[in-house]
Amino acid sequence: MRKSGQLGFTLAELLIVIMIIGLLTTFVMVNFQRGKRSNELRQAGTELFQNIRLAQGYSVGGNSIYYCVEGSDSNEFGSCVDDEACGGFSGQFDYCKNGVPQGGYGINISLPSSYSLFANTDYENFYFMGNDQVILSKDYYLKGITIDSFEIGGTVYSPSVDSLDVIFEPPQGTIHFYVSTLPVEETYAYLLVKSQYVPDSCRKITINRISGQISESQSSCSL
């Protein structure tokens, strides 16, 4: 019991103050972490959007690379610096070419947490591992971010089951969609980017195959 005229706080009052400070600190930290995760999600959505546009720009702009041609046994369609890197020598059938890939450039999504921008150097219009050159790869596994699903023609797919290739064919950048290496002649493709830490908000990428327009926006977490 506090005596008359004595200054200070009782133990109970100190405990209450400490508890209030602890609750406020927890609240601030939770909101800080959510804000950080939300920002990571926005960045991932913007980055995917920009890399799809980059593949489109490479095809329309005629971006050239070095790659093997004429069916080299040792490095078929792969990257190269000279003819010997392709398994052939100058004057023979296998040689290193500097040019625009005949299939243009594309984005391959074959796992929920990662994707690749690649040069479509072989004779297929979808990503062929070992042949097509990977220009850049992104992996968001450690951040808990995934390309949760994609929709084409009213059908929703999961990258854990079906792969998606978005190809930009030069010189006009004509868009082709491939689901598990099969062509899909639909107008729109929608990609949903999701964070396991922000379950109520996602980023949505929209690709219009006819007009060539690509956009990115906030969305609910369903297609």
Image (spheres, rainbow, N blue to C red):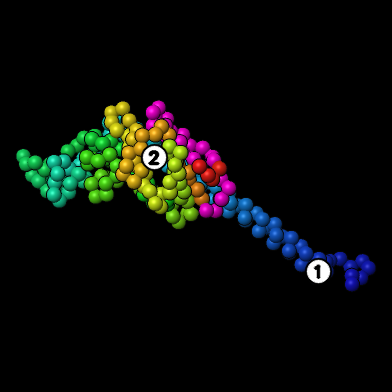
Local SS, label 1: helix
Residue in view at x 43 percent, y 34 percent: 188
* Picture quadrant where residue 24 is located: bottom right
Residue 190 is situated, as x and y percent measured from the top left of the image, at 45, 39
Amino acid under disc 2: Asn
Viewer-closest of 104 and 192: 192
Res. 114 visible in picture: no
Q: Is residue 28 magenta?
A: no
Tell me: residue 165, above or below residue 214.
Answer: below
Quadrant in which the N terminus is drawn: bottom right
Residue 38 is situated, as x and y percent measured from the top left of the image, at 55, 47
Q: Is residue 7 left or right of residue 31?
A: right
Magenta stretch: dominant secondary structure: strand
Q: Is residue 194 left or right of residue 121?
A: right
Using the image, tell me which numbered label, if any, was put on residue 12.
1
Residue to which mark 2 is pinned: 51
Specify the segment rendered in magenta.
196-219
Viewer-closest of 89 and 207: 207
Q: Residue furthest front?
A: 154
Amino acid under disc 1: Ala
Tell me: residue 9, above or below residue 194.
Answer: below
Local packing at callout 2 (Cα closer than 10 Å; few below 14, some 14-19, many 20+) is: some
Residue 50 is situated, as x and y percent measured from the top left of the image, at 42, 38
Q: Say whether marks 2 and 1 touch (CB < 8 Å).
A: no
Using the image, tell me which numbered label, if any, was put on residue 77.
none
Q: Residue furthest left?
A: 91
Q: Is residue 186 left or right of residue 11?
A: left
